[in-house]
Amino acid sequence: MKGRMKAAILYKPFDMRLEEMEIPEIGPNEVLVKIQAVGICGSDIHFYKTGRCGTFVVKEPLVLGHESAGEIVEVGENVTNVKKGDRVAIEPGFPCGRCYFCKIGKYNLCPNVKFYGAPPIHGAFREYAPADAAFVYKLPPNLSYEEGALIEPLAVGMQGVRRCNLEDGSVIAVFGCGPVGLLTMQAAKASGAATAIAVDILDYRLEVAEKLGADHVVNAAKEDVSKKISSLTDGRGADVVFEVSGATKAFEDALRVVRPGGVIVQIGIFEAEEIPLRPALLIDKELDIRGVFRYANAYEPAIRLAAAGKVQLKPLITHTFPLDRIHEAFKVVMEKIGNPIKVIVKP
Amino acid sequence: MKGRMKAAILYKPFDMRLEEMEIPEIGPNEVLVKIQAVGICGSDIHFYKTGRCGTFVVKEPLVLGHESAGEIVEVGENVTNVKKGDRVAIEPGFPCGRCYFCKIGKYNLCPNVKFYGAPPIHGAFREYAPADAAFVYKLPPNLSYEEGALIEPLAVGMQGVRRCNLEDGSVIAVFGCGPVGLLTMQAAKASGAATAIAVDILDYRLEVAEKLGADHVVNAAKEDVSKKISSLTDGRGADVVFEVSGATKAFEDALRVVRPGGVIVQIGIFEAEEIPLRPALLIDKELDIRGVFRYANAYEPAIRLAAAGKVQLKPLITHTFPLDRIHEAFKVVMEKIGNPIKVIVKP
Amino acid sequence: MKGRMKAAILYKPFDMRLEEMEIPEIGPNEVLVKIQAVGICGSDIHFYKTGRCGTFVVKEPLVLGHESAGEIVEVGENVTNVKKGDRVAIEPGFPCGRCYFCKIGKYNLCPNVKFYGAPPIHGAFREYAPADAAFVYKLPPNLSYEEGALIEPLAVGMQGVRRCNLEDGSVIAVFGCGPVGLLTMQAAKASGAATAIAVDILDYRLEVAEKLGADHVVNAAKEDVSKKISSLTDGRGADVVFEVSGATKAFEDALRVVRPGGVIVQIGIFEAEEIPLRPALLIDKELDIRGVFRYANAYEPAIRLAAAGKVQLKPLITHTFPLDRIHEAFKVVMEKIGNPIKVIVKP
Amino acid sequence: MKGRMKAAILYKPFDMRLEEMEIPEIGPNEVLVKIQAVGICGSDIHFYKTGRCGTFVVKEPLVLGHESAGEIVEVGENVTNVKKGDRVAIEPGFPCGRCYFCKIGKYNLCPNVKFYGAPPIHGAFREYAPADAAFVYKLPPNLSYEEGALIEPLAVGMQGVRRCNLEDGSVIAVFGCGPVGLLTMQAAKASGAATAIAVDILDYRLEVAEKLGADHVVNAAKEDVSKKISSLTDGRGADVVFEVSGATKAFEDALRVVRPGGVIVQIGIFEAEEIPLRPALLIDKELDIRGVFRYANAYEPAIRLAAAGKVQLKPLITHTFPLDRIHEAFKVVMEKIGNPIKVIVKP
């Protein structure tokens, strides 16, 4: 498809411009997707505010956005799994398929991955984006494009659940009730957790957590998390703690409240370069601390769980903006205007 | 507690007598339970009709029944985890705690286990029964004794789910929709299965399956199971098949309909001493076939899932009889009178 | 590289001709390998004798051979992991890298795989063969080409070992001491098995097994396998049985001699379309039966184990023939002339 | 057995007295062992120097020592697995067999465990000690009592190996080459590691590591561990790092040198109450950090590996003292006199 399209291009911190660019050409194994919904993620905000995120630095003008869904408008010559007109969620990382990590099925660790909105790969805040056909997944009729965009943070939560081999009937705690925390909690409950304890410092988020299935909520700014979880679990502690907040204090609490033999799944990104770890807890309780980096093989089951109604996506979508008002959308997220959970941009 | 009590004692096939016997004495680590509800299991029927079940043979008069719940009326001197008056579900096998299998946590394989209703250990069709205190589990207020009795078959289902490391978002098939099949299906859905396909040859059971969450039902007497499941899964097959029927044909189908790299969990007991296995399917699809024998460490999480409403037990209870009418209760099960699913005896 | 080369081409059963064919062209991700050593596998013999193997049928003239190693003489434009002159073992299946199975790391189940010597893909009984660069692995200096060819059957054994999560200190039994059985046994011992019991019906193979580390050998034609293994394991049984013989009787024995909670790894290919399975053993002992189909991610560690001397390959090579004498080589395997274990053809 | 015996009793730091005490009586499930060899462990030294170790505090006079083997001189009335005269290694922790952790097979986490030399349970630096019969293991004829005592630290190493599901062909690094480190390295190599990199700051320990199978040794006081391991692994990093040193710097290095998707097994005990953790490495490399606390179900396989010659124990024993000279033995360990690895006391 030839022509030009609108895109939100980040030039430098706080300098994102709505401009026109060429509609990209696609290769034989790719599809072109007319983007219909893109979620704003914390990492987008990082890039927007600082021009960097983790080890990534924006050097050339960059289109952000990696939580996306849309309609296929063109398919490459080798593509057979989807066709023009299909509604799809886009898994935003396209691994090489040939390296050690791809071959063992942990393609999230592929060093050659091309990931939407991670420099120098353009993301989805534009009208059309190319995608590897093996990484787009049909949306069933009962999932909207907005919900399709939320498959991405749900996939992060499912990666977390898979990283801890969650046993059915488990008691879990989730630290941090932003979008990923809320989706991790739901993924865990859908995957067998019998009891979920949600922890945050903002009451409006805890209210959403409760609506989405939290059995207990704890405001860490008002209560002693460690004591509360101990009392809720007859002193044994949580089988698994999903740390999604990236707060140093939360990580410390996690080691305290997890039961002996339990698992801490670290999903949240820390500002701090170093955080303190109490090794006596790690060893005496024979704990596991497991990091989560993106996801692999999670999109397909995530869509199935959402389509089956076992995970609710709609209640997370608090705000929607057209592409023209993307600056406003970013502002809502950054300044937490109107108790945002997930803000969606619709090109 | 001294005194005498009523019990249903099997002398020989079809000769089960309601008689009085001594209330048993308990040891220091035991509790005495006033039995309030006992489910009738297929193995009870086997013993009743033939005097044997598998390798077990009734040589001395025997009280059957192992799906039970009741109230604690006496505790041994070392017991601290429960107290008089507690409402409990009884895990009916008491392993030795000291052998190789107990030490590795697979106490269901303990060769020294004492199991209710397996000769020569008396079961629960009586007013009082002794139990190892480490194997009784408090029922939360929202679970009745009848539901407490059903924790036993639910534990079988959960053992099945744990034996296949069920991944969230999986597509599963359950062959056989008796009580264990229905509970296995629910346990699997509660543990992350997104889609459940229930198979049976009796429509009334499939109707119950549908009410309890089956996404698709297949009557194997009327439809080609293999074709149906293939079409329901876009040709890929089910991720896991729980074979709970014990029908040779079902086992054959299981190998056909499971996807490459998938798992067949064999729960159903076969009449046949030998069944045919197609090795080309086992190898070319690199399948796993995994047997299930009772359960270990499943009662506590089973109660949690049931209490959380993630597994429904009540809809399975179709008939209830007092101990005096136990013969009638057995007849209902044997002759499938009134579309029975689970029949409960209340001493 | 342009030109013509010699190849052994199978036209129909027993009609394999040494002819000239074009040296194949390679794609940008491929390498051209000058084949230096090719092992003869049981499946090659099947094709040779019957024109088919399992579900594969030879319809067009076909070059057999998939256990191979050689020297890289040309590399495609995208290739960076190897270079001209490198000595490599060739993993003979080239999966698509994009399907469900490839993405989860089980690329051995890829339905689009191109596998040497499986119709219609030509194999390695020729002077030059093309290979996907991601599936050739450098041989360290202390491994010869002949040993490099044996990495293939070793990879099968390692897949077996990985399929059973072999615990260190285990007692294992191997049924069938052909090349794959002997390599499976060595892989298991290198991976933590403390005690290996080798079973076969040919004494000369058991002698090789003993040289390669079998702690006990049992001739199934002369001894009662079940009783012998029981006595060797103090009545408990083997933790894992690797069934590599494809004999119905061996499969029956496997279920008998494996300990409760143990695993049977089925590697051997059966002539019989159906074999009898005793379900009571599967269930009462809560066994796992796990099929093995080729291998995934096994070449690299296989080479490391062989290079480290933890698995011996050389003692398996009993015969070597030049490509011109390939008919003789096949005859030696088919008629077991001179107690062959592995016969190598050197183009 | 009635009578009195000699014992080394710790009264307070540096005040350990050789005194007489009653030979202990045994219960029906216990055995009395005439202690023949006891290793001195780092935790014994801790108690000796400070009167405490971790959360344990010596309040009453205490016999230390938990790495022991001896001859059974008396058996309780229920004991059937061993008999008088048997030579055994003693697993020094006797769990309750009835709690949640015992039931799931992680009896090392049993809160009711009685552990030799952990207050208030007397250990093995005495002539006779009682032991739970389920936790003594027969020594095969080719293992001496001294080697039997070393089964304990080997069991720690095997617990480490099991905690990381070590894959065959792996590249591992061991940080810290004291007795546990050297045994962990050997256990890992016996369990499938193809390449072991040993790291320490003392050359004499690295020499022992090399003799026991280390493929590469790195003196962390002289070389950059991170660079060295990177170069030894073609830049990929080690599949697993066993951190056995308890040095803060080593823990930091561990996160750097482990490959993406790899595992750090934390065995070493830290002096520091808090150590710094770089969360970016944990997450971006999607690492696992797994603590090790003692061991469960490791003695039997440890004895099998040692008896099979796959792990060498003898080369670790550098010094042996009679019970009368226990003070000297402790001094050798504390002051590293004569390059000690493991010092054995023989009552």
Image: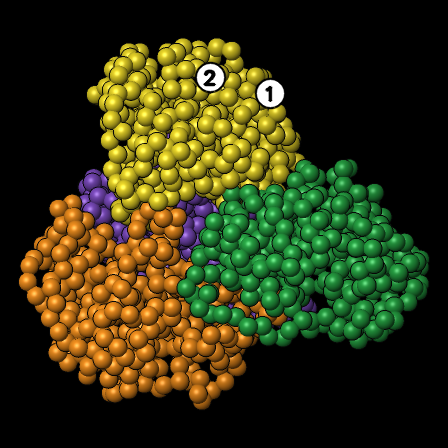
Chain colours: A purple, B orange, C green, D yellow
- Where the N terminus of chain A falls, by quadrant? bottom right
In the image, residue A221 sits, relative to residue A208, either above or below, namely above
Name the spot of residue D248 as percent of width and height, x first. Answer: 44, 24
Q: Please indicate, yes or no, whether residue D99 appears anywhere in the rendered image.
A: yes
Above or below D30: residue C132: below
As measured in the structure, the alpha-carbon distance from the residue carrying label 2 to the one carrying label 1 is: 21 Å
Q: Secondary structure at mark 1?
A: helix
- Is A304 left, or right, of B211 in this rendering? right
Q: Which mark is residue D207?
A: 1
Report whether residue A208 is seen: no
Q: Amino acid at mark 2?
A: Thr
Marks 2 and 1, the one that precedes in the sequence: 1
Please provide percent x and percent y for residue B52.
33, 73
Secondary structure of residue under mark 2 = strand
Callouts 2 and 1 close, C-beta under 8 Å: no
How many numbered marks appear? Answer: 2
Q: What is the number of the mark on residue D320?
A: 2
Residue at horizontal 93 percent and vertical 64 percent from the top: C19
x 35%, y 82%: residue:
B206
Q: Is residue A88 left or right of residue A243?
A: right
Q: Chain of mark 2?
A: D
Of residues C225 and C338, which is closer to you in this image? C225
Inspect the image, locate mark 1, and give the three-letter code of the amino acid beneath it. Glu
In the image, residue D177 above or below residue B22: above
| Chain designation of label 1 | D
Asked if marks 2 and 1 fall on the same chain, the answer is yes
The image position of residue B196, as x and y in percent, is 40, 72
